[in-house]
Image (tube, helix red, strand yellow):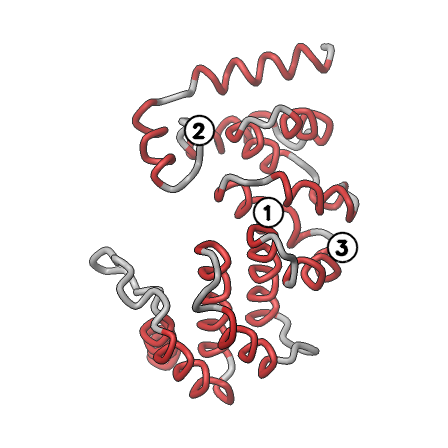
Amino acid sequence: MPAETVLGEVMAELAALEDPKARAVNERHGDDHGVNLGSLRALAKRLKTQQELACRLWETDDTAARLLALLICRPKAFGRDELDAMVREARAPKVNDWLVNYVVKKSPHAEELRSAWSADPDPEVASAGWALTTERVAKKPEGLDLAALLDVIEAEMKDAPDRLQWAMNHCLAQIGIEHPEHRGRALGIGERLEVLKDYPTPRGCTSPFAPVWITEMVRRKTDG
């Protein structure tokens, strides 16, 4: 079947999955699509991995199509420059999240991009770099200068744009949780900056305020 026919059929199926209620929920989080994520994953499971189709879906600039593309692509098939271009195009928060977590983290270019993106002047790109740094803090901290990361967080997190602030705060919390030798400083930075201190947190969930987050996760690890 011609590639354009397949693309058209998939786009029609995505359009049929559009749900006004889902769109209203997603738009509250900055995502401009109305497809239930469970339905999107079911469609991806049926399509299986299709790199060419994934690239064509990405090119549509449609948020639901791009999310589907990230589910059916081959992460290691993208070159370094392709991934750099994609992160600069990924303005919807969910697309940015999935691109980093489902694709870039599995790429052989992840470390090079992490270093390049973390100091990028575009806060959306920088947030992707910090997300990759947080992954290393938790899973592969060897070679990272955690004290220097805390220096940057202490100096810049308070006034950072929302998405970048969130990513830096996650890194701060992860340093405090995973690295006892830096825990006291991480807690102190969180207390002084008060970033996300008043963030509305549903009952039963842990606050993203770093001192609370660190303390709770350390308690769970100790109790476990």
Q: CA distance from mark 1 to mark 2?
A: 19 Å
Above or below, 206 against 181 in this view is above
Instruction: Name the one closer to the observer, 150 or 57.
Output: 150
Amino acid type of the residue that numbered disc 3 sits on in the rendered structure: Pro
**Does dot 1 land on a helix, a strand or a loop?**
helix
**Quadrant the C terminus occupies:** bottom left
Q: Nearer the viewer, mark 3 or mark 2?
A: 2
Question: Which dot marks residue 108?
Answer: 3
Q: Is residue 207 above or below residue 16?
A: below
Q: Indicate which disc, 1 or 2, sits on the residue closer to the N terminus.
A: 2
The residue pinned by badge 2 equals 33
Q: Nearer the viewer, residue 5 or 163?
A: 163
Estimate the x, y position of residue 58 in percent, counting from the top left: 64, 30
Vertical placement of 94 versus 104: above or below?
above
Identify the residue position indicated by label 1 in the image: 102
Q: Can you tell which quarter of the image residue 209 is in?
A: bottom left
Is 95 left, or right, of 32 in this rendering? right
* Residue at position x 65%, y 58% in the image: 120
Q: Earlier in the sequence, mark 1 or mark 3?
A: 1
Secondary structure beneath dot 2 equals loop
